[in-house]
Image (tube, grey):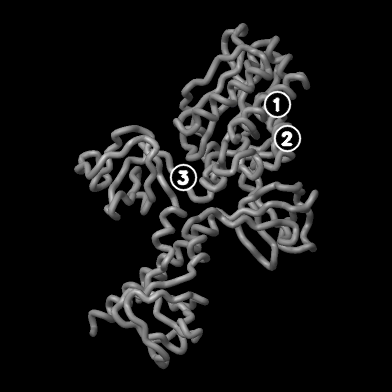
């Protein structure tokens, strides 16, 4: 009897711990999107507070806090502000666990005999008894108990730790998955290169992710066996990401635009003094408008001349699960005659984005195409999303600098990147 109580307590603890984990995770990735043409950002949660800025239709922000129907939002450079809840739409995070907790519909009795009680407590009266394998429809949940509807329509309560949620099997398909990138990938018994190989898999095969431990994913292979695969051998996808990917077109895609440098970091200085940080923001501003018109969810890593660290830029991409991350830069060389544009990628997941954008950019701006290259840059290396870095031309080249400052070049560069993104999401 004592042992049973211990088991119950342990299960309850596990249940509570996982419930708490779900809550924190969901909060960390909550965003809101402005659904008005113009909305004021205020210094506090109320109309009495001063106006600290403004936001436009479809602007999306990370939520830091919530108070009296107002959201505290993350602005650039570590600044924050408040926006009224009635001016925005809250975006559900793509968190798999979070969605699952909402979609529980049935429970299967996991013990030989289970009492259904009048209220959610072990001391409450038993109103019915069910047996192993019975499917119960869940109506409500409270403190680890499920309110269920019995076959005759009666409502009662069962302890959550005596049943299994029916969506368990579907949960894997709904949750995170990894896809193998190479043939003959080793699936091992523990997260180490010296661990024994349980099985091998080929490129394109997908497996549900159970857990991530360090650089390894614990995955489920055939027959429910658990195995480990190195994270650098796979591409991970979330349920939300896959749902988006399935829908073709740029509409609804999350695109993070990263204007290089800003604030005290000027980037390179052109032959006749053009600051890279100024021209990157100019290009991104124009691209932003075009993408938003096409219905994309566009997020900027900075909107003004402020300093944003490289890790912060990457975090914006990762927490928003960007479908594409595009960093905009302009190049420099000691040799003034060097010219042309270059497209950099780091991970293989960014390669097709790089190829397509480079091609479209070349078609549009018609300067020397230096090609698609591997580049070890922080914002694309640390990025978990498809990410590229564009060097649109050489500010150190006097002719190219003048040309790049022209409206015509800006328009063509923006069109090239835009066409590339359109083609990528086709
Ligand atoms: Zn740069």
Quadrant housing residue 286: top right
Across and down, in percent, residue 325 comes to 57, 36
Residue 225 seen = yes
Label 1, secondary structure: give it. helix
User: Which circle marks residue 100 in the picture?
Assistant: none
Quadrant housing residue 116: bottom left
| 153 displayed left or right of 365 | left
The residue at which mark 3 appears reads as: 237
Which quarter shows the N terminus? bottom left
Label 2, secondary structure: give it. helix
Which residue occupies 65% across, 20% down?
269
Which residue occupies 36% across, 83% down?
130
Image vertical order of residue 180 relative to residue 209, above or below: above
Q: Residues within 10 Å of mark 3 (few under 14, many from 20)?
A: many
Q: Is mark 1 within 8 Å of ligand 1?
A: no
Q: Earlier in the sequence, mark 2 or mark 3?
A: 3
Which quarter shows the C terminus? top right
Which residue occupies 57% across, 25% down?
356
User: Which circle marks residue 415 in the picture?
Assistant: 1
Q: Are marks 1 and 2 in contact (CB under 8 Å)?
A: yes
Residue 264 seen = no
Q: CA distance from mark 2 to mark 3?
A: 27 Å
Image vertical order of residue 358 relative to residue 121, above or below: above
The residue at which mark 2 appears reads as: 290
Q: CA distance from mark 3 to mark 1?
A: 29 Å
Image vertical order of residue 281 relative to residue 99, above or below: above
Residue placed furthest toward the bottom: 125
Across and down, in percent, residue 20 comes to 45, 66
């Amino acid at each position: 009897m004592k042992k049973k109580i211990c088991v119950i307590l342990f299960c309850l603890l596990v249940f509570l711990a996982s419930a708490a984990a779900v809550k924190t995770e969901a909060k960390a990735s909550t965003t809101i999107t402005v659904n008005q043409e113009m909305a004021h950002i205020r210094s506090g949660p109320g109309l009495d507070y001063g106006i600290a800025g403004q936001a436009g239709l479809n602007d999306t922000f990370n939520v830091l806090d919530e108070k009296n129907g107002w959201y505290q939002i993350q602005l650039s450079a570590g600044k924050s502000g408040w926006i009224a809840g009635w001016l925005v739409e809250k975006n559900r995070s793509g968190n798999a666990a979070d969605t699952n907790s909402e979609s529980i519909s049935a429970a299967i009795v996991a013990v030989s005999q289970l009492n259904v009680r009048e209220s959610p407590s072990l001391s409450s009266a038993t109103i019915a008894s069910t047996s192993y394998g019975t499917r119960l429809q869940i109506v409500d949940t409270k403190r680890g108990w499920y309110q269920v509807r019995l076959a005759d329509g009666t409502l009662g309560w069962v302890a959550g730790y005596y049943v299994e949620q029916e969506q368990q099997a579907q949960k894997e398909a709904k949750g995170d998955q990894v896809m193998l990138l190479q043939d003959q990938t080793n699936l091992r018994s523990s997260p180490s290169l010296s661990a024994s190989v349980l099985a091998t898999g080929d490129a394109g095969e997908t497996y549900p992710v159970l857990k991530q431990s360090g650089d390894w994913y614990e995955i489920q292979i055939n027959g429910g066996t658990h195995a480990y695969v190195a994270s650098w051998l796979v591409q991970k996808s979330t349920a939300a990401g896959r749902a988006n990917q399935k829908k073709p077109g740029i509409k609804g895609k999350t695109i993070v635009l990263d204007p290089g440098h800003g604030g005290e970091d000027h980037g390179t200085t052109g032959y006749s003094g053009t600051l890279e940080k100024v021209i990157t923001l100019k290009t991104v501003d124009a691209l932003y408008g075009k993408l938003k018109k096409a219905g994309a969810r566009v997020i900027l890593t900075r909107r003004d001349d402020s300093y944003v660290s490289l890790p912060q830029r990457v975090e914006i991409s990762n927490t928003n699960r960007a479908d594409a991350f595009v960093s905009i830069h302009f190049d420099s060389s000691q040799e003034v005659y060097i010219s042309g544009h270059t497209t950099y990628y780091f991970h293989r997941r960014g390669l097709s984005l790089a190829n397509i954008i480079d091609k479209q950019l070349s078609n549009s701006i018609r300067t020397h195409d230096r090609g698609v290259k591997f580049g070890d840059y922080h914002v694309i290396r640390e990025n978990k999303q498809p990410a590229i870095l564009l060097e649109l031309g050489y500010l150190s080249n006097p002719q190219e600098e003048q040309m790049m400052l022209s409206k015509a070049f800006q328009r063509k560069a923006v069109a090239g990147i835009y066409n590339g993104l359109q083609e990528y999401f086709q």
